[in-house]
Image (cartoon, rainbow, N blue to C red):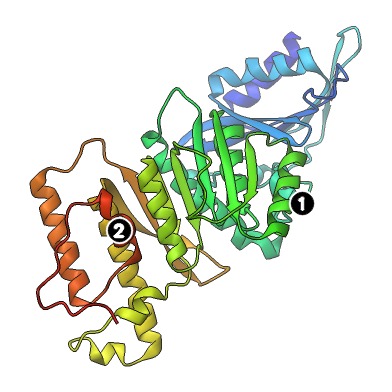
Amino acid sequence: MQELYEIVDRLVRENTLIQATLSQPRRNEPDGCSKVTVKPVMLKGELHYQFSAFFGPKVKHENVSPAETTGKLVQWLTDDFRQGLLQAVEADYQALLSKKGKLAVLRKPPTKKADTARPPEHNRKKNYVLEEGTQIPFLVELGIMNAEGKVLAKKYDKFRQINRFLEMIADVLPHLPQGRTLNIIDFGCGKSYLTFALYHFLHEMRGMDLRIVGLDLKEDVIAFCGALADKLGFDRLRFLVGDIAQYDELRQVDMVVTLHACDTATDAALDKAVRWGASVILSVPCCQHELFRQVKSEALAPLLQHGILKERFAALATDAMRAKLLELAGYKTQLLEFIDLEHTPKNLLIRAVKNAAALSPDEGAKLAAEYAGFRDFLHADPYLERALASELPALTRNSGQDGAL
């Protein structure tokens, strides 16, 4: 085994290992590990090696420092597999272990080009949360990736969207409760590309204890997603047919995701999230009609007289008021650009995280005045304000407000 250890150690130290693949398990166990791949990845500017262990349709990822990589790779191979292929810049090394544990290492010409090794930092392609090149079962099942781990050309935009979403999820993880099972709800989950991605990232990659529920009104979509979750072994992910406003199965929810819930259905989901005291809210609104019917202003007449401009302005104003109402309810909010190719080339995501401390009376009064002034200027009467009335400070209206149309 010393020969194998020395080869792996040298390849790791010299940073010439392109990929290692361990195969042919020593024990034929139905739920056992069938294959392990190892490849270099850059994480926050530092080199690591990503171990991907395949258990049936599930893959478990672990990022390991170079100092730990040699021992971990050799142990995986000698304890669990009969064959290992180390693809390096200068050569391929094939390690073969007999049933009695006797090792033979064969050196062969390289099968991967040198330029596939770790390039300089400034020349590297974007480091996605989900890396291309390693099979990710849920992406294969959803038709985004083939069995070899290559993203299909027509689905690359969806692949980028999923990764952008997971980057946003990674940013809010510190705001979630620790040390207990997390409850996550995805309202209006649809075909659930992002729901499956969320489960894979949090449970399979991060090892977090959680339960996720995907909710949608379309029975055929929910049946498809439920069957796929079973096939993938995602036993902490459920899909239910149901309406956002009527869902009351859980009393405590830690994260609420609502993507493309139409018009005031987004507001119903935000209302639910606030009343649950959710630590994190992620919302990408879809069509927004409520304020389009309400908004009026003589000062804005040159803008509002054009239907397309009025529609866009009403959508932006709606999201601005939603963000301010969430702040009044005790959240810190951001409006972020979100890649969304199914609806519009660009869209907004409302990201809200619950403040650790309550607003002071002065802070609450200032926010309330800002919100009320904007609302009254547009003659608006937002659904979300009415829904959250009991959760918000008193919001007065100007005496000259003549109500919504």
Q: Residue at x 25, y 58 (%)?
A: 324
Give the labeled residue for mark 2: 323
**Of the residues shown, which amino acid type is indicated by label 1?**
Asn
Identified at 65% across, 26% down, the residue is 11
> Is any part of residue 123 visible from this angle?
no
Circle 2: residue type: Ala
Q: Which quarter shows the N terminus?
A: top right
Does the rendering let one see residue 330?
Answer: yes
Q: Residue at x 40, y 86 (%)?
A: 308
Number of other residues with Cα within 10 Å of mark 2, as a class: few under 14, some 14 to 19, many 20 or more: many
**Among all residues in the image, which is located at the extreme top?**
100
384 relative position to 84: left or right: left
The image shows residue 251 at horizontal and vertical percentages of 45, 37
Q: Which residue is mark 1?
A: 146
> Which of the two marks, 1 or 2, is nearer to us in this view?
2
User: Which residue is rendered at x = 74% and y = 53% of the image?
Assistant: 224
SS label for mark 2: helix
Which residue in the rendered view is the most extreme toward the right?
Answer: 99
Between the C-alphas of marks 1 and 2, the distance is: 40 Å
Position of residue 74 measured from the top left corner of the image (x, y, whole percent) = 71, 16
Q: Is residue 135 above or below residue 341?
A: above
